[in-house]
Amino acid sequence: MKEYIELEIICTTEEAAEIATAFLADYPFDSFDTQPHEGRWLLRGYILAESWAECRDEALSIAATYGDDVHERSIED
């Protein structure tokens, strides 16, 4: 099994979610999912845990810039 990190960012606007996705796409994320969530936008990005360790600080900085609430959790595939 592979271990992934799910990065979850709650953004106030769809535009903020799109911009965050564009910046995060420079890192080795496998996929992104964006959807409306309680009047805001929920962005989820999935990245291998070993890759996450190499870009965590930069990715969290982007998430904090464009999101109001940020969570990361480990998941297995």
Image (tube, grey):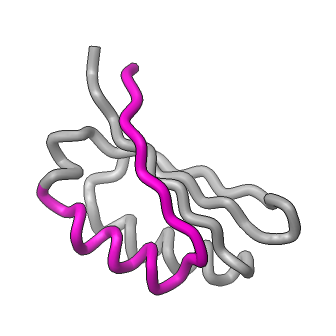
Residue at image location 36% in from the left, 36% down from the top: 74
Residue 15 on image: x %, y %: 68, 82
Residue 4 sits in quarter: top left
Quadrant containing the N terminus is top left
Q: Is residue 63 above or below residue 15?
A: above
Question: For residue 15: magenta?
Answer: no
Q: Is residue 27 left or right of residue 35?
A: left
Q: Is residue 17 left or right of residue 60?
A: right
Q: Is residue 55 left or right of residue 40?
A: left
Residue at image location 56% in from the left, 77% down from the top: 67
Magenta-drawn segment:
54-77
Residue 50 on image: x %, y %: 15, 41
Q: Is residue 16 above or below residue 72?
A: below
Q: Is residue 20 above or below residue 54?
A: below
Residue 28 on image: x %, y %: 27, 54
Quadrant containing the C terminus is top left
Q: Nearer the viewer, residue 75 or 22?
A: 75
Residue at image location 32% in from the left, 69% down from the top: 59
Q: How many numbered tags mark residues here?
A: 0
Question: For residue 63: magenta?
Answer: yes
Q: Residue furthest right?
A: 39
Residue at image location 53% in from the left, 82% down from the top: 66
